[in-house]
Amino acid sequence: MQEDPFTGHPSRIHGSHVLDPAEHAALQDNHKRRLEALARLSTAAARAGFGTDPDDDLVLFPADELSLLASAGGVWRELDEAVGVLRSFLPLCPLDLFGFPVASDDPFGEGSPRLRRIGSGVEATAFQSEDGSIYKFYLPREDGRIGGSFSFSTGNDEVAWIAEACLGSYRSLFEKLLLIMALQGMPTEVIAATPEGIIVAKQTCGARLHDGADTSALQPKALIPIPSRFLRAHRDHPRLFFLGDNTWLIADLHCRNLVTAVDGTLRAIDLLAAPLPPKVIDSDPLISGWLSRVRHDPNARLLHEGDDSEL
């Protein structure tokens, strides 16, 4: 494992190198442990009387902020230890470490001498380093939000539920990066957070698909189509994915979010996701029954018997 040229911390990603299964699993484990550390910090913060939604203050908590209070023990020591664990998986690094001018009103616009800007989207601005690695800078939004997610509302006579894209949380951003890895997408590391709330992720480089490419038949095999009367998401290619105890809505795997890796495989580099909330899963026996069956059999029909085309 090499050092990242900016942070000096160990990094598994280098240019277009595709990780072997053991490296991939180790990186995925890192994503899981970061989420567990954030959950632990959220629980400790709630016990100490801190707000936990939005979660930006938790993610940006300095490691030595509670050193004096921690000596009193109890919830303060618990909170201090939880902050330390999260910082071990999400170090705070200044933005100028990546070559951007901190004093500028538009540091990404002025650029970095060590990074070449290659694109900008709603959630992040992407750059490429000298060794070919991709660096994505996820920008915080209003009210402590970052990235994207879905909100769910009841539908109408044609569809039970509607999913609309909305602003996300830091936790939902970390979950999205874990999901990319779980779908055998491009290896992605979270390497830093900046004091301004920017999350820096590093990703393996791949070749882009041509503009307008139809990816409806190129979705990852683990994704499951959603019956039209069950859920409608106003995003490209909405699918279901089961990971852990959660049922995830995955979407936006269009041509700009899929690339070809150096080994010839098609891999996701970005997506939009959210776990289905209990209100959706438990709202209708038809829905909950199908979800229970399709978790074990991706080809399960919406009904036990009959032709789903009639639905």
Image (spheres, rainbow, N blue to C red):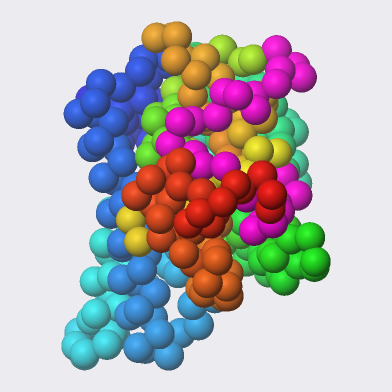
Q: Nearer the viewer, residue 32 or 230?
A: 230
Residue 108 appears anywhere in the view = no
Look at the picture and state if 105 lies above or below 47: above
Measured from the top left, where is residue 190 in percent x and y? 42, 42
Residue at 23%, 37% in the rendered image: 26
**Which image quadrant: the N terminus?**
top left
Q: Position of residue 178 (x, y in %)?
A: 41, 45
Residue occupying image coordinates x 56% and y 51%: 306
For the record, the magenta segment spans: 210-235
Q: Is residue 176 left or right of residue 33?
A: right
In this image, 80 relative to 177: left or right?
left
Q: Nearer the viewer, residue 33 or 233?
A: 233
Relative to 306, say whether 64 is above or below.
below
Please tell me which residue is depicted at 55% across the width and 66% down the height of the picture: 286
Magenta stretch, main secondary structure, is loop
Compared to residue 72, the image places residue 216 above or below, namely: above
Q: Is residue 228 magenta?
A: yes
Q: State how many labels appear.
A: 0
Q: Quick check: is 148 in the magenta stretch?
A: no
> 55 or 98: nearer the eye?
55
Residue closest to the far front: 306
Can residue 261 be spotted in the picture? yes
The part of the image, by quadrant, that contains residue 259 is: top right
**Whole-percent x and y of residue 169?**
56, 62
Residue furthest to the right: 157
What's the residue at 31%, 62% (across, down)? 36
For residue 293, what is the image quadrant?
bottom left
